Image: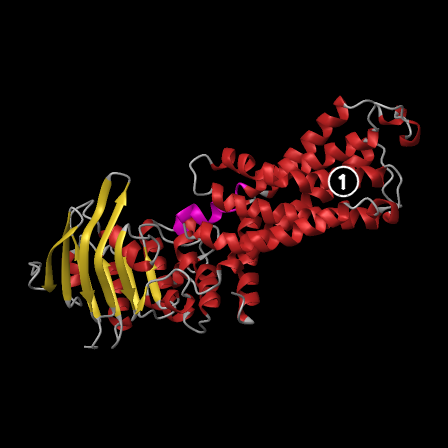
Amino acid sequence: MSAAPLVSLNGIGVSFGRTAALREVSLDLDEGVTGLFGPNASGKTTLLRVLAGLLRPTSGTVSVLGRPLSAKDEAQRGRIGYVGHSSGLYGRLSVVENLELFARLYGVRGRVPELLERLGLNGRATTPAVDLSAGFRRRAAVARALLHEPDLLLLDEPYANLDDEASELVSLAIMDWRAPGRCAVVATHGAKKVKRYADTGVILQHGRVIRRGTYEATGFTT
Amino acid sequence: MIASSGFLAKTAALAIKDLRVELRGRDTLPPMVAFAITVTLLLAFAAPDATRATEPSSIPVGTVAFTDVVAAFFWITVLFAGLIGFSRTFEVERDQGAIDSMLLVPVDRSGLFLSKAAANLLFVGIVQLFVLPLFALLFHLELAAGWLTLLLIVVLVDVGFVAVGTLFASVAAHTRSKELMLPILALPALVPLFLAAFELTSDLLGGDGLEAVASRGWFGILIAFDVIFAIASALAFEFVIDA
């Protein structure tokens, strides 16, 4: 474990008008994978968007990879991989065109064929993203997020619309990505799937952290 | 800001992406061109017969030269066709949440702005390639003699137009009624640019050469507008897109 946490949230609050999505969330995350659980509207997506720097919190401070989170920090942005509810792909471009575009923007070489293979996308490489099934689009989105081997990986429901075989490919890709000094937060309803590789778990409810600790301690042991 | 040589390569990759998406989807350019041609035809029907127009030199005091009217027609057609296209600038990013992926890539925000502006500049240029010959044909304009001056005017106007249009398109993209918001936001800022465009084009169509056209100071306004708004828009874009 590293001395300072890789991710540190201090008193984070997020409000949309009069609705509070996150309330006074304070959390330190070290290297490894953290499962983020909770019912619908508990604040999982909001928390991931705050960590990605895509949503400015109403209150509190965020530190990511040893520095205060800043949208202006290009180097910091380049170390974050994020998959939201949408695929984050360009629908008119094929899977391989999307991945090659992002590879160019991240300055990455030689990773595209490897990720196509790893996520079982070879048969769909030339299909426009808009024509992919929801499951294949999800896999392509995960491939895009892993392309630059980020140090902070944020995945929002990576198993949505995936069958068991595809879920296994995504799990294996995340396990392959794991390395010392890297941190992932995986928000999912599929606690069972995350169990294989998660180190810790956090449960959110009504925008508050109601339980956190080792994966077993959060209660998702089956 | 613009720190590395990779900046230009990444900006080019983003602009090529926008053009490739447009080539496949044809969502932006065809409506712009169709609008511009339709308006041009309507104006040609509505306008008096150009062959009976009075020579600018012999126009009685208190009346308007035909070239003034045609210059205004041309630029207003380009203005609204451009706004139609600009309003779609960020649609490609909103579709499937690509904007989230794009905001995380380690590229300066000004690169994203430049790529969008470059694509918009190309679209406006293509619209003008269709509209200008049509105007010349329908309004009996003699463009051959002053084509270089006209090209200079068009380029200078387009740069300022695209800089302002792209910036306000990013502002409007944050609103629910973006197609309505864009003209409301952009038109007041574009007034000096298009005033200069009307005046310069009118002078040129009236038979003035480059020297005479330039002597009235409108070129200076165009150049000042371009420099100020190109820089200000690229800088302001960062705050708008991260808002």
Q: Nearer the viewer, residue A50 or A119?
A: A50
Placement of the N terminus of chain A among the 4 image quadrants: bottom left
Q: Residue at x 45, y 63 (%)?
A: A102
- Does B39 sit above or below residue A157? above
Q: Is residue B103 left or right of residue B222?
A: left
Q: Is residue A157 visible?
A: no
**Helix, strand or loop at mark 1:** helix
Q: Quadrant of residue B193?
A: top right
Picture quadrant where residue B189 is located: top right
Q: Is residue A194 magenta?
A: no
Position of residue B237 measured from the top left corner of the image (x, y, whole percent): 50, 52
- In the picture, residue A143 is in which quadrant? bottom left
Residue beneath disc 1: B132
On whether residue B91 falls in the magenta region, the answer is: yes
- What chain letter is assigned to the residue under label 1? B
Q: Which residue occupies the foreground of this view, A210 or B195?
A: B195
In the drawing, does residue B118 fall left or right of residue B133?
A: left
Q: Residue A76 at what x, y percent from top left?
A: 37, 67
Q: Residue at x 25, y 72 (%)?
A: A178
Residue at left offset 84%, top offset 29%: B65
The residue shown at (78%, 24%) is B47
> Magenta segment, which residues?
B87-98
The amino acid on which the numbered mark 1 sits, given as a three-letter code, is Leu
